[in-house]
Image (tube, rainbow, N blue to C red):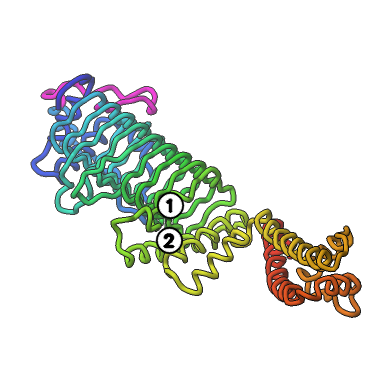
Amino acid sequence: MTHRDNNNAEFWRGLLEKGNDEPERINNWNKYLYTQYSQIKSIMPKRNNSRDGLIETTLITENDRTRVKEFSIINGPWPDWPQNILESFMNFSNMEIERNISLAGRVLIGADFRNTVFKGWADFRGAVFLGLTHFENARFKGNESIPQVGNGVVSFRDSVFCNSVYFKNTVFPHITRFDNAINKGNFNFQEVSFNIKEGFLAGAFFGNAIFESGADFSKTKFVINTTFENAGFKDRTSFKEAYFQKNAVFNNTTFENSISFRRATFRRPPEFFEARLHEDLNLNGIDWSKAERSYKPRHNDDAATAKIKERAEKAISAWEGLERIMTQLEKYEMKHVFFRLMKRAERYRDGWSITTIANLIYGFLSDYGWGIGRSLIWWFGQFIFFAFLLAETASIQANQKGIEWSVKITLNSFLVSFSNSLSFLRLGSAEGHLSDNFDALKLATNQMGSIFSTVGTIQAVVGPILLFMVLLTLRNRFRIG
């Protein structure tokens, strides 16, 4: 360690090295602490039978007390127990730790690692953090993985944070683990970032972690694959403006309180299969088109067609899963957002086919049943276009007969076009209300009768289809029926 602020760090470093191997050093650390600080018993969390990471109180012998006194003679007096357990006590702040360091399995009281630089790997597996814990602006730079179990470059697996922990602006390495960690206080993970090392495996793992109080991941940059699979968030959780560059996996994750992804960025479709989200869910301000680029050919020039289809297939499943969740939460607007994303992804999976053409037409005419304005424009557009076509045809015929154009010709054209567009009402039939208008216009276009009948046939098909699109978008928007 290179000092910038040693405070009591030298004392704790000496205790870390007390023992011949790691199991003995862990035992000595905890037993010495229990011997010197009886207050630990009252603030240690009760053992949870479902987890093995909590440390039980050890019976203290007279021999232990003697060894603790001997240690203080050699390494200096034990630091006084803090008047407020929320104060920093074990102070490793503003230091450069040159070598690999293991604090696994240890009880850490008021641990302060603010601005600390870890040049090797850092192992905190199974550690119990009492009091407030600080890692603000810490830098983890280790290139090697923790030996034997491959637990990453920095690992908090099975650790327990008994009070609030602060990781704001911390830089983590390419493999970081919080699997099975228990967080009893607020988990502050704002503006954290992860290093990427080419040629190395990478991932941020929070699988099975439990967050009993608030968890804040605002503005954190997850530039590596990230998983919160089977994690449990029991209080308010925020991923506001978080950035997910690779895969973001929330499968089987439970959010029991409000959750915000407001203005978050996803570069790939996130996975929420079998996740349970609280109804107070905020997905506002997310530009989902950025996730779509991961499987669009024009953004993946180096990817083979089979790879594009594979990515699109995976995206379809992700969007479909989110659509189901939104249906359960009765968030119909967001449900349709994911439905549209799913339908667009199907085009890249299916390639050019009849299904894809139908898909394109559906999206083009009504934005997959959501664009009221678009569907209205198409219906009114065909109605007005064919009305003018009929009026122009009738006008030409009238001029050839020496008859002056009249407003009545235009009116009849619009009425006939309207009737054609609603062919199922049979307004132009012999018994229909517009039969006279039909007869008059048909007579006016008798020399170009094929146009009259062709227009009628086209509108009889197109008009109802476009009207259905209008009604569908109205239903989806206002949940009619």
- What secondary structure is found at the residue carrying circle 1? helix
> From mark 1 to mark 2, how far is it between C-alphas?
9 Å
Residue wearing tag 1: 291
**Left or right of 104, for residue 264:** right
**Left or right of 350, for residue 23:** left
Q: Nearer the viewer, residue 306 or 94?
A: 306
Region of the chain picked out in magenta, as a range: 72-92
Residue at x-position 26% and y-position 36%? 34
Kind of residue indicated by mark 2: Ala
Q: Nearer the viewer, residue 473 or 429?
A: 429
Local crowd size for mark 2, using a 10 Å CA cut-off: few (<14), some (14–19), many (≥20): many
Residue 212 position within the rendered picture, expressed as x and y whole percent measured from the top left: 46, 45
Contact, CB < 8 Å: mark 1 with mark 2? yes
The magenta stretch spans residue 84: yes
Residue 424 position within the rendered picture, expressed as x and y whole percent measured from the top left: 79, 75
SS assignment for the magenta stretch, majority: loop
Residue wearing tag 2: 315
